[in-house]
Amino acid sequence: MVLQFCGSKKSLASGVPMAGVLFATSQVGAIILPLMFFHQIQLMVCAVLARRYADQQFSAVTSQAA
């Protein structure tokens, strides 16, 4: 589960410096924009998954207590 949440978040942190090295300064913004959208989508999906996992855990705990 750690890899699911933490391993996929490296796209923006590693992509921006690499884009700065690989592409001309005037092109970096246009290249990074899709990466920024992808990063936001990753965060939103992980928020949904975290809520789903928390609900499953809560259901399991309450069913064991009953």
Image (cartoon, rainbow, N blue to C red):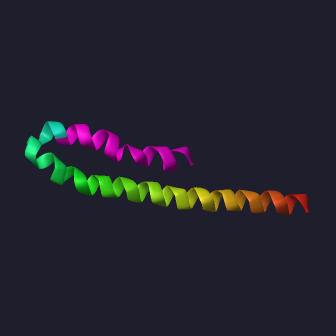
Examine the rendered structure and indicate whether residue 44 appears above or below residue 7. below
Viewer-side residue, 4 vs 44: 44
Residue 23 relative to residue 64: left or right? left
Residue at image location 41% in from the left, 46% down from the top: 9
Examine the rendered structure and indicate whether residue 17 appears above or below residue 26. above
Q: Is residue 64 magenta?
A: no
Residue at image location 30% in from the left, 39% down from the top: 14
Viewer-side residue, 37 vs 2: 37
Magenta residues (range): 1-19
- Name the image quarter holding the C terminus: bottom right
Task: Give coordinates of residue 54: x percent, y percent.
Answer: 67, 56
Residue 20 relative to residue 13: left or right? left
Secondary structure mostly seen in the magenta stretch: helix
Residue at image location 21% in from the left, 39% down from the top: 18
Residue 19 relative to residue 51: left or right? left
Residue at image location 40% in from the left, 59% down from the top: 41
